Image: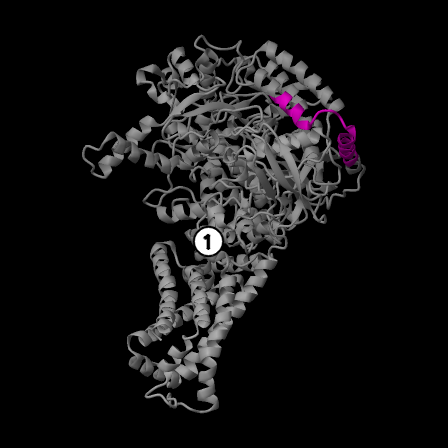
């Protein structure tokens, strides 16, 4: 089995597996975040549950971090390997003649998403870790705020238009990444023709809904403020 | 029609190589692309210059020898054809056509537009066969019925001509369409299933060893393949390799 | 030297079995000490290499292409015959034997043909076991189609790519042996001479086409499997690199060359369009199963069509001349190739050719669209389907059968063959002649064998469709591996053959000198200039029909052209690099000699038989007229110049088949 994951196809499969996990995570993340628009109270409760449940915090969170790191590191490793498979590039290459922009630029959409994750960590994840693990405050409350603090923190982040703009750009790139990545992951796992049409439709819907949802939330909070 | 050609010239494997411009005149639109190259070469020979070396043989799209990257696409702008089947009616008078060899680390240039594709042969040596004695003392050909569907799918995979357009086209220089097609042909037939696990493992291992890149499912190979080999063959190879490891 | 065909005694159906039971075998431990060189990796060479290696011999295989898989067998489209009688339509070994001898116009050796028919069934078994994806019916069993010149369906096929699939099967068998180290593969190598030591073939001189290096390779036997010489015509359906060099070199070293004038002109090729044309493209004969061949009845319509004022579809059925159906009601459009080709030429010569060059006839699928369409409408329970619907349904069936050929046609001609009839014209396709071999497939040089299209073959004066693949694989898989053992059994104590002998030295010197000559000649004309000129002489005077005057002229003209070639040929570049012009110069030099022998043979054979049609010898209604006194194989011995070649006759006896007028009416 270890030999399998060292093979080219094994690496594809591992990319696909981590992608599946990340895509599931995105769906879950969006579902919770959309609550911040629909019902701030429910949003707060669910956020508190996710933020304090040991299973989420000590099992799912490390797995998520591993998946993110793995997906990026493997992505870069493969990119390097792939670019070394062609030492001299074409003087003229009509890539658009046979493939989509998304499929040819996964590395660039990926790097944008990586940069975004950096920003996102600074915005939310580092403060959370600081509060919970360094200061030891697991109450989910904050001075000057009634009930849980999560909704207030979220709204606060979307005041600055520059940040909102950065989020929107990143989500567009995420959408492009997913537009290829969704079906690609199934293909890597050996998905066949019979399911292809359906899969492609689901992939399209997914890669539009996820970023559109996040963009909507960011804009909603920005303009509502 | 009159054309300007920008062609990659490289004396041998050690030469650095460069693009050189040529002019050809009075090209008929009924000519095949290679016949246009013949005109250029005749012109070069008569002028005392070295003709452009390029691979070609059957000139009817089946041997898989011809291999030019024309205006940024393997076998040029037409679909479902090899370079020898590409006709000049696809171009216009006054066009500039860029002609390059297949570019892949696993396909080193021998001269001008001729590349070394023996990596493909070595992948086949690693398992591209069914281990059956050639004595002819096998069972009757009709003793194992094979569903028409499976036979047709195997045939579709087997139509690969081994030209290498998939590798040339792939932004990663991946050979997975080629290997996937061979793995699929045998995996779909009962005769091939006996050695299926070893075959896919050995062929993929050799493919990796040859320095081909990794498939990122862009689908470019399927579009440029002169025989229209489907991406499904790569998916099937992925399944076969997973199956072989479980 | 008297020719001994070494045909075993006994009743024809037992000859091969008895013979196999009594020939010498080489013990497996000794096979390891024996080397065999195989030149060419097509169906014959590929299958022979794989089988010899499987048996335990050390095989060295040579191909001028970059991979064995690219040999021109790959371009065979239609199918492979085998007497399996899966269709239950009365086929049998005898019937395949009979059809082949009759199809060959009674100019082949009975015993060889019977053996071919006998092993044909094994080929299909073998190929299926190798994973060749033959077409199957819905019950999962193998499907068959019918081919020209026969009354049964015995042709197995893999879409329109049967040759490709069979070659890939042989290639896969080779791969297995290459991986085991039993075959040493020399790609991009060309054999330039055979080396004879003590009267036996003991090796070859080959040139590495990438580096230009001249190499010596020794072996205990040499097998020539380098295909046919159709490229002597410049334009043919052969691959650009197909050449006679290997066969011609062994001829010059003592192997007799048989029946060079027997050439097959295939009826269903795409007509030529201009002088720049480098090759002709064949479309499978299977098209004649569903297409009907015609030209207009009136010359006015011909004129109107050429001028573009009328379209072929404008002509009513009454205005069309379905000349094959008219002349040959029993076989119709499925007459053998030589007959179909000549009939098309006859119409075109009479002025009925339908394209600008006057060299094309129609191949029309309209009635098949209708026939299949009606059948489909019944199957799908459509009531009163419209004509358009019927046509559409019919076209789908035709598309499934020949879609790739229709697509190929459209790409080349730029006309949609679903809407307007195809145009076709005969083109040089296959050469029945070749190096003379005995029953063991050995040439007149001991230890030198010739198999597949390279030998003078079992096809007599004309080959039936789907029989070339059968012969190539039969020779390579099932015949040569036995017969070569009989010879090699004497070589178990010989040990490795040294390449340092004076014979190797001399052969290499000769090859090198010739290459030096080409490079240093710095003449005025390119190699193609000569090749095209030779091709024109051959096509005009040694083509579909020949006459004494033309042949005599051809001999003179070829001889003069050859002299000019050796004075004025221009080969650019150097000898120590990848130099296609240099390789081609050597091949054309050999064609220039072969061409003359070809014409000499055609002149000598004062009869019409199969692909060889002498205008002086035809029946009143223009059919080929065979002559009893020419019932022999012409085997030519090399004596310096082609004109000095000496004829040896191998008389042909027909004990199991009555020699009759070959009629397809």
The quarter of the rendered structure image containing the N terminus of chain C is top right
> Does residue A111 appear to the left or right of C301 in the view shown?
right
State the image coordinates of residue C193 (x, y, percent, origin top left).
71, 34
- The color scheme shown is one colour
Residue C382 sits inside the magenta stretch: no
In front here: A102 or C298?
Answer: A102
Q: Which residue is mark 1?
A: A100
State the image coordinates of residue C434 (x, y, percent, origin top left).
60, 27
In front here: C85 or B229?
Answer: B229
Residue drawn at x 45%, y 72% is A163
Q: Residues within 10 Å of mark 1 (few under 14, many from 20)?
A: some
Residue drawn at x 44%, y 88% is A132
The residue stretch that appears in magenta:
C507-535
Residue C534 sits inside the magenta stretch: yes
Count how many numbered circles sit on residues in the image: 1
The reply to whether residue C663 is in sight is: no
The quarter of the rendered structure image containing the C terminus of chain C is top left
Residue sitting farthest toward the left? C383
- Compared to B79, does C623 lie above or below? above
Residue drawn at x 47%, y 55% is A101
The reply to whether residue C502 is in sight is: yes
Q: Identify the main secondary structure in magenta.
A: helix
In front here: A176 or B53?
Answer: A176
State the image coordinates of residue C542 (x, y, percent, origin top left).
58, 17
> Does residue B197 appear to the left or right of B18 in the view shown?
left
- Compared to B66, does C600 lie above or below? above
Residue A179 quadrant: bottom left
């Amino acid at each position: 089995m270890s030999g399998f994951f060292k093979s080219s196809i094994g690496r594809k499969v591992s990319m696909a597996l981590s992608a599946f996990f990340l895509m599931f995570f995105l769906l879950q993340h969006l579902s919770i975040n959309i609550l911040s628009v629909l019902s701030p109270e429910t949003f707060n409760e669910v956020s508190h549950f996710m933020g304090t449940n040991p299973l989420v915090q000590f099992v799912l969170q490390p797995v998520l971090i591993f998946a993110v790191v793995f997906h990026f590191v493997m992505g870069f490793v493969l990119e390097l390997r792939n670019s070394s498979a062609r030492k001299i590039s074409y003087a003229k290459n009509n890539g658009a003649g046979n493939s989509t922009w998304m499929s040819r630029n996964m590395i660039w959409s990926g790097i944008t998403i990586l940069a975004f994750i950096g920003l996102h960590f600074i915005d939310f994840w580092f403060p959370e870790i600081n509060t919970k693990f360094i200061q030891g405050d697991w109450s989910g409350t904050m001075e000057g705020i009634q009930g849980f603090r999560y909704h207030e923190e979220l709204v606060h982040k979307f005041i600055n238009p520059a940040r909102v703009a950065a989020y929107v750009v990143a989500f567009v790139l995420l959408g492009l990444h997913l537009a290829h990545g969704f079906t690609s992951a199934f293909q890597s796992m050996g998905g066949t023709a019979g399911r292809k049409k359906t899969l492609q439709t689901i992939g399209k819907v997914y890669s539009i809904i996820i970023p559109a949802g996040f963009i909507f939330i960011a804009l909603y909070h920005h303009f509502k403020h | 029609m009159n054309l300007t050609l920008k062609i990659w010239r490289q004396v041998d494997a050690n030469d650095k190589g460069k693009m050189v411009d040529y002019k050809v005149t009075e090209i008929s639109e009924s000519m095949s692309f290679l016949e246009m190259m013949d005109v250029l070469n005749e012109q070069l020979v008569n002028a005392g210059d070295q003709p452009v070396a390029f691979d070609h043989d059957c000139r009817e799209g089946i041997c898989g020898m011809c291999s030019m990257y024309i205006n940024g696409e393997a076998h040029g702008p037409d679909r479902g054809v090899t370079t020898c089947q590409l006709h000049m009616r696809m171009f216009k008078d006054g066009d500039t056509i860029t002609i390059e060899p297949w570019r892949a680390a696993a396909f080193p240039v021998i001269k001008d537009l001729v590349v070394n594709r023996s990596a493909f042969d070595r992948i086949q040596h690693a398992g591209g066969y069914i281990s059956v004695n050639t004595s002819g003392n096998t069972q009757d050909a009709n003793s194992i019925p094979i569903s028409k569907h499976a036979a047709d799918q195997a045939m579709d995979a087997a139509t690969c001509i081994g030209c290498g357009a998939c590798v040339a086209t792939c932004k990663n220089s991946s050979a997975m369409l080629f290997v996937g097609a061979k793995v699929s042909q045998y995996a779909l037939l009962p005769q091939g299933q006996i050695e299926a696990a070893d075959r896919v493992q050995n062929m993929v291992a050799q493919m990796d060893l040859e320095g081909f890149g990794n498939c990122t499912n862009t689908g470019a190979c399927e579009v440029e393949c002169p025989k229209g080999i489907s991406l499904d063959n790569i998916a099937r190879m992925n399944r076969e390799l997973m199956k072989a490891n479980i | 030297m008297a020719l001994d065909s070494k045909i075993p005694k006994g009743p024809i159906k037992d000859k091969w079995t008895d013979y196999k039971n009594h020939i010498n075998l080489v013990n497996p431990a000794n096979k390891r000490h024996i080397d065999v060189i195989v030149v060419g990796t097509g169906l014959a060479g590929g299958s022979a290499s794989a089988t010899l290696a499987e048996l335990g011999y050390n095989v060295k295989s040579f191909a001028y292409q970059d991979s064995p898989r690219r040999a021109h067998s790959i371009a065979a489209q239609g199918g492979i015959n085998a007497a399996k009688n899966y269709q239950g339509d009365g086929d049998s070994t005898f019937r395949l034997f009979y059809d082949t001898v009759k199809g060959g116009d009674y100019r082949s050796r009975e015993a060889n043909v019977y053996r071919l028919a006998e092993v044909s069934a094994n080929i299909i078994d073998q190929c299926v076991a190798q994973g060749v994806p033959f077409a199957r019916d819905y019950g999962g069993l193998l499907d068959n189609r019918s081919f020209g010149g026969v009354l049964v369906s015995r042709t197995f096929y893999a879409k329109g790519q049967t040759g490709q699939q069979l070659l890939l099967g042989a290639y896969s068998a080779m791969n297995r042996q290459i991986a085991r180290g039993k075959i040493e593969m020399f790609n991009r190598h060309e054999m330039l001479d055979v080396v004879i030591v003590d009267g036996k073939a003991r090796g070859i001189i080959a040139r590495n086409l990438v580096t230009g290096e001249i190499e010596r390779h020794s072996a205990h036997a040499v097998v020539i499997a380098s295909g046919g010489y159709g490229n002597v015509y410049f334009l043919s359906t052969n691959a650009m690199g197909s050449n006679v060099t290997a066969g011609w070199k062994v001829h010059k070293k003592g192997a007799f060359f048989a029946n060079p004038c027997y050439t097959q002109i295939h009826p269903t090729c795409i007509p030529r369009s201009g002088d720049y044309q480098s090759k002709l493209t064949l479309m499978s004969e299977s098209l004649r199963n569903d297409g009907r061949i015609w030209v207009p009845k009136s010359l006015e319509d011909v004129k109107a069509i050429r001028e573009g004022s009328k379209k072929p579809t404008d002509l009513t059925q009454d205005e069309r001349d379905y000349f094959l159906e008219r002349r040959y009601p029993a076989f119709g459009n499925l007459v053998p190739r030589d007959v179909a080709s000549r009939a098309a030429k006859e119409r075109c010569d009479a002025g009925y050719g339908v394209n600008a060059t006057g060299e094309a006839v129609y191949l029309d699928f309209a009635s098949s669209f209708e026939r299949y369409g009606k059948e489909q409408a019944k199957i799908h329970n459509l009531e009163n389907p419209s004509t358009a619907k019927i046509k559409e349904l019919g076209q789908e069936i035709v598309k499934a059968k020949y879609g790739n050929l229709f697509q190929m046609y459209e790409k080349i001609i730029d006309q949609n063959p679903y809407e307007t009839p195809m145009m076709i014209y005969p083109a040089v396709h296959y050469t029945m002649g070749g190096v003379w071999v005995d029953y063991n497939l050995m040439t007149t040089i001991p230890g030198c064998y010739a198999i597949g299209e390279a030998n003078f073959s079992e096809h007599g004066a004309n080959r039936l469709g789907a029989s070339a693949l059968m012969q190539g694989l039969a020779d390579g898989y099932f015949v040569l591996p036995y017969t070569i053992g009989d010879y090699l059994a004497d070589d178990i104590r010989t040990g490795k053959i040294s390449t340092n002998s004076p014979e190797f030295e001399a052969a290499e010197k000769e090859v090198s000198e010739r290459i030096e000559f080409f490079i240093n000649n710095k003449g005025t004309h390119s190699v193609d200039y000569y090749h095209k000129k030779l091709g024109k002489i051959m096509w005009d005077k040694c083509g579909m029909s020949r006459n004494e005057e033309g042949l005599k002229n051809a001999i003179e003209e070829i001889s003069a052209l050859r002299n000019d070639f050796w004075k004025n040929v221009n080969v650019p570049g150097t000898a120590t690099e990848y130099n296609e012009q240099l390789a081609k110069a050597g091949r054309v030099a050999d064609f220039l000699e072969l061409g003359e022998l070809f014409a000499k043979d055609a002149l000598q054979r004062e009869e019409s038989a199969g692909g060889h049609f002498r205008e002086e010898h035809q029946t009143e209604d223009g059919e080929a007229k065979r002559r009893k006194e020419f019932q022999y194989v012409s085997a030519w011995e090399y004596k310096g110049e082609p004109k000095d070649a000496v004829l040896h006759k191998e008389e042909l006896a027909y004990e199991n088949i009555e020699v009759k007028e070959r009629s397809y009416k």
